[in-house]
Amino acid sequence: MKIKISSYIYGAVLFSSALNMSGASAQSDDDFFKNKQVKLIVGFAAGNEYDIGARLLARFLGRHIPGNPTVIVQNMPQAASIVAANYIYTQAPRDGTVIGGITRNLVNQALLGQTNIEADPRRLIWLGGTSFPGRVCVIGEKAPVKTIEDIFKTELIVGSNGAGNSTNILPTVFNHVLGTKFKLIEGYKGTPDIALAIERDEVQGVCSSYGQFRNSAQSFTDGKLRVLFRAEEAQIADIPDVPSIYDYARTEEQKQFMRFVFSSTEFGRPYIFPPDVPTSRVTTMRKAIADTVADPELVAEAQKLQVDMAWRRPEDLERSTAALYKTSPELIEAVKKLVPNLQ
């Protein structure tokens, strides 16, 4: 299997074409943004994956906004980007000059009742997102499990870096909801360490973000590691033939539970405006970000840096938000009990 960073140019180009504006609103935005400074507030520390992606976006974004404003990045990492989300929601100017780059978990956290969240995800304006950190379960060549059906009958020992991490949450949810037979061994520093542990026969597999295996490409090529299934309903572009665990849910309730817990992936690294930004500027910025993601120079730089800049459409983020807010209170309470560290 070849591990690569997908650019998803096609979807971004289609979206950009669909948003071509007619003259009047475009001209007004030319006048507005000219000689302005657009601030991109990143809710994580410098060097974090969100920060790296945001800074790459910022480098090219100004050339795609009418009037070519300067785009600067400001980090606001307190409370894992909740402070940034609250700032965007309650204090940031509502004229289109401030963008937020926030956690993909905001909607889940708000629905789970995290007390320090002031922002209402339903009122935030979703501008789109970058990256599709699809999650997978990977096995070693000596694992007793060979197919996805086997995991319901045969125990599989998987490594984990502890509670609150996907290496723990994924197998825990699969066991509880679907009846799989994962056995967790905790104490590893991260997915790369677990991948090495698989090759040393310390454990037999791991469930984690697909991108975490970028440095294990040769092990997949050599057959030492293999993707057993994906933990997403949507296909992962690099491995389109890998089956989805959702196909093995027996009831719609089981699917809803997993959708809620795993839904953050659908948001990628999301970008937002505060409420009440003028519609024309929302349209302008959405198109600018889509154009930027498709910029050949950005795509080349993303490939070089191994930064996933896959495009997540704003309509998809709005749809995901609306769907999550239809989750029943009973299901949310069940999630709190099973995976309290999801917050």
Image (cartoon, helix red, strand yellow):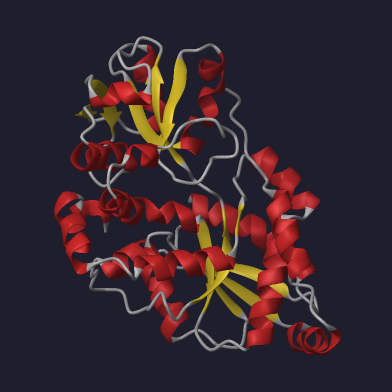
Q: Which quadrant holds residue 281?
A: bottom right
Relative height, residue 81 to residue 39 (above, below): above
Side (left or right) of 157 relative to 69: left
The image shows residue 17, relative to residue 235, as above or below, that is below
User: Is 9 on the left or on the right of 110, as rendered?
Assistant: right
Q: Where does residue 245 sit, x and y in percent of width and height?
A: 37, 37
Which is nearer the eye, 326 or 279? 326
Identify the residue shown where x is 33% and y is 42%: 166
Expressed as whole percent of the image width and height from the top left, the position of residue 302 reads 67, 45
- Residue found farthest to the left: 337
User: In what quadrant of the picture does the N terminus appear?
Assistant: top right
Residue 287, above or below 254: below
Q: Nearer the viewer, residue 38 or 27?
A: 27
Please identify the quarter of the rendering in which residue 58 is found. bottom right
Residue 101 seen in the current view: no
Residue sitting at the far front: 251
Residue for point 43% across, 59% down: 104
How many labels sit on residues? 0
Q: Position of residue 3 (x, y in %)?
A: 58, 29
Q: Quadrant of residue 12?
A: bottom right
Q: Is residue 237 visible?
A: yes
- The C terminus - image quarter: bottom left
Q: x%, y% of residue 300?
A: 75, 44
The residue positioned 45% from the left and 64% from the top of the image is 320
Q: Residue furthest right?
A: 23
In the image, residue 18 sits, relative to residue 26, either above or below, namely above
